[in-house]
């Protein structure tokens, strides 16, 4: 299941398309002369078939997935990776915490109008919403409800 955009456009104008597949994320990239390369693995180490893709005003692509925790059945952790440039590898997937969501939960990167200066992720979990907001200097504020 994809939430948010799955097609992004980089600073140089080329498109990238993302898809969760087989426990990882794969990406296709538009080539400078036309055509597409890929699929290329961006890793994920056992992600559920869920992916939220968002893009900040800086044109960085943020990928958010869910991965089983290995504990109680059905519990997952949110994980995040960022791609700084079209066609380049993504940074390592990093855990964002363990919400009380099930694999069928939703996370969306919401945006109204033009992208804001700092991406925000709203994750629906159980009966509430959790928010992760990017800091001005990079990195992310702790999650909250």
Image: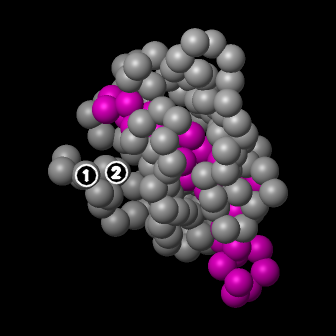
Is residue 54 magenta-colored? yes
Residue 142 in view (yes/no): yes
Q: Callout 2: few (<14), some (14-19), or many (20+) C-alpha neighbours within 10 Å?
A: some
Q: Quadrant of residue 112?
A: top left
Q: Which residue is mark 2?
A: 133
Marker disc for residue 138: 1
Q: Quadrant of the C terminus?
A: bottom left
Q: What residue occupies the far bottom of the structure in this picture?
A: 71
Marker disc for residue 77: none
Q: Quadrant of residue 57?
A: top left
Q: Of marks 1 and 2, which one's residue comes earlier in the chain?
A: 2
**In the structure shown, which secondary structural element does the residue marked by tag 1 occupy?**
loop
Q: Nearer the viewer, mark 1 or mark 2?
A: 1
In the image, what residue occupies the spot 48% across and 66% down? 94
Is residue 107 magenta-colored? no
Q: Foreground residue, 62 or 107? A: 62
Measure how far apart labels 1 and 2 are at the Cα level.
10 Å
Q: What segment carries the magenta color?
A: 47-76
Q: Foreground residue, 48 or 122? A: 48
Q: Quadrant of the N terminus?
A: top right
In the image, what residue occupies the spot 30% across and 40% down? 118
Q: What residue occupies the far front of the structure in this picture?
A: 33
Residue 54 in view (yes/no): no
In the image, what residue occupies the spot 31% across and 50% down? 134
């Amino acid at each position: 299941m994809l939430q948010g955009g799955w097609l992004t456009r980089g600073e140089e104008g080329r498109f990238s398309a993302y898809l969760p597949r087989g426990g990882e994320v794969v990406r296709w990239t538009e080539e400078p002369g036309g055509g597409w390369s890929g699929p290329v693995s961006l890793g994920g180490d056992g992600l559920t078939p869920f992916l939220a893709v968002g893009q900040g005003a800086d044109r960085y692509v943020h990928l958010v997935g869910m991965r089983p925790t290995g504990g109680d059945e059905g519990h997952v952790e949110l994980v995040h990776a960022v791609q700084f440039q079209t066609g380049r590898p993504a940074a390592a997937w990093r855990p964002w915490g363990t919400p009380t969501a099930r694999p069928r939960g939703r996370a969306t990167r919401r945006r109204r109008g033009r992208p804001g200066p700092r991406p925000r992720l709203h994750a629906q979990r159980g009966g509430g919403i959790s928010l992760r907001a990017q800091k001005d200097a990079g990195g992310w504020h702790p999650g909250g409800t």
